[in-house]
Image (cartoon, coloured by chain):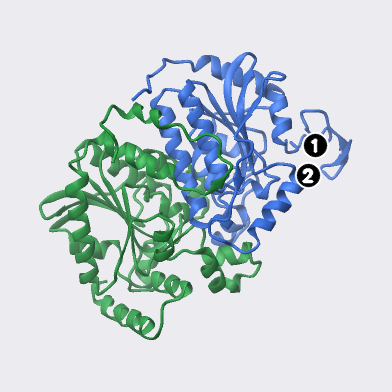
Amino acid sequence: MLDESPRFKDAVDKMVEHTQLSSWESVQLSRRLGRPGAMTFINLICDSFMELHGDRFYGDDPAMVGGIGLVDGQAVTFIGNRKGANLRENVRYNYGMSNPEGYRKALRLARQAEKFGRPIVCFIDTPGAYPGLGSEERGIGEAIAQNLKAFSTLKTPILVFIIGEGGSGGALGIGVGDKLYMLEHAVYSVITPEGFASILLRDPSKAAEAAEAMKMTAHHLREFGVIHDIIEEGSAEETAACIKAIIVRDLAVLCSKPHTHLVRYRIRKIRGIGEVSGIAKTWWKPLLGVFGKTESLS
Amino acid sequence: MAELCSVCGHTVTVDELRICPSCGHYFPLSPEQRIALIADEGSFVEMEGSMQSVNPISLAGYEEKLKESQKKSALTDAVTIGSCTIEGEAAIVAVMAFSFMGGSMGSVVGEKITQAILEGALNHCAVILFTASGGARMQEGIFSLMQMAKTASAAALLEETRTPLFIVLTNPTTGGVTASFAMLGDVILAEPGAVIGFAGPRVIEGTIGEQLPQGFQRAEFQLERGFVDAIVERKHLKKTLSFLIKTHKGREVSHVG
């Protein structure tokens, strides 16, 4: 996988060279074969990493990687969508599309992290959850729903990095956290541009047009206040170094905060996303007291 | 008034339960009809009735689409929320309307569902959500996706107060609604025959390259797979809900922080 990245870097340079990237070009870059994935970053960031398998109910989903790594000596639980670096790996990892057991493994490892006081780092890189028969039979909707609920009140810091494709509920299923970051050519959206084009524009060939209309690039998402910051992309090593620096910096702050403080801040942040008019009631903050008493919130 | 049944094709006259006398198909209920069916007469008080959608990603045509849907349905958006009593038991209810842009969840639906849940948490009052949705509202882009996290985090908060959340899945409930609050009930009920799933049937067929088995993703299938507690006929719904509220009183947990 690693030896693929210089070629990937060339492709990026070529596209960036002459002009500002269009949204559609970002979509293409975010999907490009050989783009550094979760495993590449985990290996470059950790002193050592141990993968942990299985959801303890049904099986192990290769499209979702999870385990414990040491980052400058600090134990961190890593969870990420896994794609392949080539066609054969892509098939093995189901193109990064998880079944319910992937989300349940993620939840098991997140609970384990909470229990042992480890922070969590998530890497998002998936076109979406797998829309197959077995996936539906085993409750893909229920699995994602449980993760959204559990991650929103998990009593340990959670950092989320969108490193490639952030596709819909399948991405959000490991995407609820305290801080969200995007690589500059990553995308994050409610549906693929192809899906948007075929449903709303009634023409699947208008994906490029859809990508622009959907406002799914890192720059748009920062403007919307959905993510905290954008990480510039260089070689896999350079990008990994940036991600690692952010992990170390953020964890130093977040790990020192009381858990109740973290959860209240996280819920308030999630609660604030959305644009409406004519709202009557916004008074609800005393409810956060269920997570324990804290000093004033920052 | 005679209506055409979309399943058996007969022209039939239905009563307030709105069930086809010919084939048993459940016609959709508007929020008003649903509330009349389960709430004690005159007990429903609507909340957030003037909340309206804006156009957060400035998508061409969305505002016109909203106006058109409002005109056609006489609703402000795809969910109605409020308080009521059910056989004397207090409840906060939310009723989604598939007739309004496919019951899709944008910022307004997410906010109103969240408010219904939080209102229940504040007052330690049972929350009942009737779902009917094709999923997230694509026209609101990333904001619609984030409503999944918002409603699910509200459910987490409700759980901390030991207040019950009851879900009634009606036809159809799919996509981002299934993958968020619809699957988070303490008790999950479904109407007979309702389609309940994450990916839509056509998307799955496109993935597997064959037709779906008969009854796939129907309420009866989901009951068998363990994702639904019970399938409840409309005529028993009010009685069932009041039974559930009575049996989930639990103990109150202080939320004053």
Which colour denotes chain A? Answer: green
Disc 2 residue type (three-letter): Val
Dot 2 corresponds to which residue? B7
Question: Which residue is rendered at x = 42% and y = 77% of the image?
Answer: A21
Disc 2 on helix, strand or loop? loop
Q: Are marks 1 and 2 in contact (CB under 8 Å)?
A: yes
Mark 2 belongs to which subunit?
Answer: B
Say if residue A50 shows up in the picture.
no
Residue A6: percent from left, percent from top: 26, 79
The amino acid on which the numbered mark 1 sits, given as a three-letter code, is Cys
Name the image quarter holding the C terminus of chain B. Answer: top left
Q: Label 2 neighbourhood size at 10 Å, few (<14), some (14-19), many (20+)?
A: few
Q: CA distance from mark 1 to mark 2?
A: 8 Å
Image position of B22 with respect to A13: above or below: above
At x 35%, y 81%, the residue is A11
* Quarter that holds the N terminus of chain B: top right
Q: Chain of mark 1?
A: B
**How packed is label 1: few (under 14 Cα within 10 Å), some, or many (20 or more)?**
few
Colour assigned to chain B in the rendering is: blue
Q: Is residue B12 left or right of residue A175?
A: right
**What secondary structure is marked by label 1?**
loop
Q: Which mark is residue A18?
A: none
Outermost residue on the left side: it is A73
Q: Nearer the viewer, residue A32 or A153?
A: A153
At 54% from the left edge and 37% from the top edge, which residue is drawn?
B113
Q: Circle 1 is placed at which residue position?
A: B23
